[in-house]
Amino acid sequence: MNNSFLNIIQWKKIIYFVFILFLFKFCFLYGYGFKTTLSFFDLGLLSIASALLLASGYITSFITRNQHKKTKVNLKKIKKLSFLLTFIGVFVGILLSFKIERPLNGILFIICPIVVHFYIKSNIKKTFISNIVTAFLKPFALLTLLWFDCPLYLTQEQWTLFFNLQLITIAYIIISFFSNIVFEIIIDLINVNEDNQNKQSTLPILLGRKRARNIALLLSIIGCFFIFSIAITFSDTKFIFTTLMLLGVLPDLYFIYHLMKASEVKNYQQLIKISYFNFFLALLSIPLIAYHFKHVIY
């Protein structure tokens, strides 16, 4: 039951979500000589609220997809648990909003569960739109952090620094979004036969495998070009330029090369492994770039 429950709430994704919050807080909002709205304790509260609401959303999704199927999990029991997690998550979120003296932020914790609930209820089948929503989940962690964690009492020089840090964060959000969409399309290419049997409406089913692959290829090229453009803007800073080229552009080119040759399930499974490695390299680039900003540029 415990293993089933952990799988239902997608615990790995939740941990990754929380990890991203703390990583970007430490790398791009801490140690630059200015204070921000959230302390690390406040960020802990934000993480708890977000994790509980995410878990509740995943439980609701599981119940919706399996309400007419036989399952070993007691759906009524986990439905009650979903309501409890939502209540605690909303309470912690509102508590945080008042603690940081921004009570209107608490509305976000009320609106998000409602929107998620109605979205899940109206989108039972797996579609390309659901892939976009899933792909947006990881970047949403950074948007949440930017929304809550604002700088306090900045000088003109510090505003310039914070603006540059925001640009870097937004760049990571855009890159993550494109990469996750491509990842979801590849997953659909692997599961196309199973999804077809279950009457899903994924991109490979609607457009065919080849066209779906070509869309993934186009998005990968756009993402790679975007990273290359950022690297060019930092061409005067050799360390950042080299980091982006080695940990961003070159791995993406390697992925694109294999995606162009992919035609069978085993090829797409190999691309999944390459994607995980590229995600790791992208995460590795974050503290490296942050260190250079903290101790070299400023």
Image (cartoon, rainbow, N blue to C red):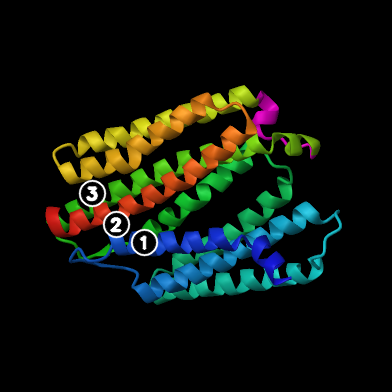
Seen at 35% across and 69% down, the residue is 38
Seen at 25% across and 56% down, the residue is 290
Pick the front one: 150 or 264 = 264
Expressed as whole percent of the image width and height from the top left, the position of residue 234 reads 20, 39
Task: Identify residue type, mark 2.
Answer: Pro
Which quadrant holds the C terminus? bottom left
Pick the front one: 250 or 99 = 250
When the figure is inspected, residue 158 is found, relative to residue 48, above or below; the finding is above
Q: Do tag 1 and tag 2 residues touch (Cβ < 8 Å)?
A: yes
Label 1, label 3: how far apart the Cα atoms are? 17 Å
Please name which of the two marks, 1 or 3, marks the residue nearer to the observer: 1
Q: Tell me, for residue 168, which label it has, or none.
A: none
Q: What range of the chain is rendered magenta?
A: 198-208
Q: Tell me, for residue 287, which label it has, or none.
A: 2
At label 2, counting other C-alpha atoms closer than 10 Å, the crowd grade (few under 14, some 14-19, many 20 or more) is some
Expressed as whole percent of the image width and height from the top left, the position of residue 241 reads 22, 40
Label 1, label 2: how far apart the Cα atoms are? 8 Å
Q: Secondary structure at mark 1?
A: helix
Residue 298, can we see it? no
Place residue 53 in its image quadrant.
bottom right
Q: Secondary structure at mark 2?
A: helix
Seen at 76% across and 54% down, the residue is 64
Task: Identify residue type, mark 3.
Answer: Asn
The magenta stretch spans residue 206: yes
Which quadrant holds the N terminus? bottom right
Instruction: Provide the residue designation for mark 3.
Output: 164
Instruction: Provide the residue designation for mark 1.
Output: 23
